[in-house]
Structures are given as structure tokens and as C-alpha cells.
Amino acid sequence: MNEMSNIEQDVRDYYGKELQSSADLKTNACCTILDYPQEIKSALANIHDEVTSRYFGCGLTIPTHIEGLSILDLGCGTGRDCYLISQLVGEQGRVIGIDMTDEQLAVARKHIQWHREKFSYARSNVDFVKGNIQDLAAAGLEDNSFDVIVSNCVINLATDKQAVLQEAYRVLRTGGEFYFSDVYCDRRLPAELAGDRELYGECLGGALYWNDFQNLAKHCGFLDPRIVEVHPISTENDAVTRKVEGYRFYSVTYRLFKLPGLEAACEDYGQAVKYLGGVNEQAASFVLDNHHRFEVGRVVPVCGNTLLMLSDTRYRRFFEFYGDFSRHFGIFPGCGTDFPYEQSFKSDAANMGACC
């Protein structure tokens, strides 16, 4: 058995046998405390207790306006997010969860009919597949078959993160998005920490340096990764804290769009957009990422990439668009060739409207 196989087996054992509930975790890396919107709180109240007790997520991986869509959850575990999304996509939508841990999948599948009845659906819109998120083809997932992919604090556990991103890009439909939370570090971890079994299971050892993630995402076709939310992670365990002294970890929610027209930088074409309203979860203002909030009725200048993320996706009908790509004015104001990582991880709503 090679080193990668050893790590994967350790992850299976850690989440299938060693952890019986989220209370068994030694850090908050996989269970960041969040203030959920009311519609999410209401949906969570309809999920079976056994499913929620073994939740190991680090963010809210539910994008807006997903009714009727086809959704894939990478590393679904016991299915908490799948059953949450099941309610939001409605009976006409579809949710598939994939995981490699038998014990987790057993809990998820055990409660399929319970949730169908709870949601008053004639038939369940949720299915669970055993497989490795690094090889979705082996699990029978076809090209261009999902509108949205979500994942909650799982990619850091994968030994081949490039394969995960490449597979996500493959199975997404054009105009779709990969909306996920994961753990990142402010620097590259040395081999002795990256290979530590406890740190890996706690979602720290496999955390990418965020600059490496940005480059990897672009290499796989997701040319303009957008940060939605950032939360610092505290280890809250003396032994773990000593191991990772000097390293800072963050739970970050990203959205990556599959849009062939995106550019690697934010370019200025003199374009603007106006939010018309209509997205139920964001009636007064639409939040694309942590630098873009669009108030209803306000015309806002945007870069070419931002325009495409609104015009060539499921959000198109909620906006008016001004300008085209016929004339280029250089880099979009406020953007540069170096992405301001540290500023981005500290930014808040005060930065909304700037491109990056």
C-alpha cells in the first residue's frame, strides 16, 4: 500500500470509526460555528438527529437560487447538506451525494425515506453513491451533468486536489459553479505536519496554502476564484496547537464558475450591471462574493469576469447589463497582477462593489 493509499485509509478510519459525532473532533476546523440565514435554520430543523450529529462541515455551502437544479455534494458524509439542499431544490430538483466511507453512507441511506416523508415528497430526490471524489467517472458521474457542485470541508482530505478540481470542472455544465468551503493555511505546511495523521483527520494537515489553491484552480479551468466568506480557525486543543504553532488556518467559502470566457485577471471593458431583484434569498441586495454586493436598482461598474458570472449563469434574468467586450480599457480599477490575499481574508462588506 503506497503513502497516498495509507492516507485515504486513515481518513476512512478516522471518519468512519474513530469519530462518532462532531463532539469527538479535537479542533473547530471541521465544525465552524456559523450564523445561518433563517431559511437554512428552518430547513435544518427538518433533518434527522442522527444525520446532524455526525456533521463535520466548516462553512455554509448553499448558494442562492437553486430551485429545480441538479446538485452534487462531494464528500457528503451522513448527508446533512444533501437533505438540506433537497428542500431548497424542491421535488423537481436532484441531489447526489458521494462519499468513500461506508459508515457515513450507511447513516445517510438509512434515512432517505424518513426525509422523503418529512418533506412530503412523492419520491425522494436524493441519492448516495460510494466513490472517491478524485475519480467521479469511476462512480458513473457523466460530463456536464450538474448545475452546481457543493462540498463542505472535504477537499483538504483528498490526496490529489488537482484531480478533484479537474473532475468537478468535467461534470459541471457550462455556466455552473463549484460552491464549497474548505480549510486553507497562510503558508505551505512542511512534510512532517502535512503527513501527521491527527492533523490530517482534523482537516489541518491537508490544508492548501491559499496561493497554491488559486493557481491550481486556474490551472483546472476555474480562472477567477471568488471568495465568499472567511472565518479564522482556532485549534482549541493544546497538543494540536503546539504542533501547528506559527501557522494560521482559515475556513474559506469559494465559488468557482465554469465559464470558458473568463480571464485570469479582472479586465475593464467599460461594463456595468443593475440588480433588478427577484432572488428570494437576497431580495434587497445580491451578494456575489465578499467584494460584490449589488443593491436593487443601482447601476454598478464591473469587470468582464463579474459580468459573465451574472450574464452567463442562472442569475441572468435578475440583472440588466450595459456594455460589451468590443473595447478594452486595461485592468479594472482596484485590481492588479498580484491578488491581495491577506486583505481578502480580512475583508468584509465595506469592500463590496470593488472588483478585487
Image (spheres, rainbow, N blue to C red):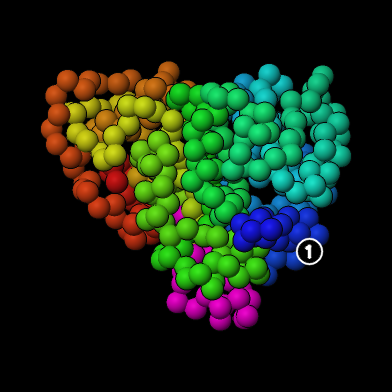
Residue 320 in view of the camera: yes
Split into 4 quadrants, where in the image is the N terminus? bottom right
Vertical comparison of 253 with 342: above or below: above
At x 74% / y 30%, what residue is drawn?
126
Please indicate whether residue 329 sits to the left or right of residue 4 in the image: left
Residue 112: say if magenta. Answer: no
Determine the image quadrant of residue 30. Answer: bottom right
Please indicate whether residue 236 sits to the left or right of residue 272 in the image: right
Please indicate whether residue 294 sits to the left or right of residue 54 in the image: left
Vertical comparison of 352 with 56: above or below: above
At x 43% / y 18%, what residue is drawn?
317
Determine the image quadrant of residue 136. Answer: top right
Residue 261 percent location from the top left of the image: 32, 27
Residue 232: say if magenta. Answer: yes
Q: What is the magenta range? A: 230-249
Where disc 1 sits, the SS reads helix
Vertical comparison of 335 with 11: above or below: above
At x 82% / y 19%, what residue is drawn?
122
Residue 65 percent location from the top left of the image: 54, 28
Identify which residue, 161 or 254, lies in the foreground: 161
Identify which residue, 296 or 268, lies in the foreground: 268
At x 63% / y 28%, what residue is drawn?
141
Determine the image quadrant of residue 353. Answer: top left
Q: Residues within 10 Å of mark 1 (few under 14, many from 20)?
A: some
Mark 1 highlights which residue?
Answer: 18
- How many marks do you count on the picture? 1
Residue 186 percent location from the top left of the image: 41, 64
Amino acid found under the numbered disc labelled 1: Glu
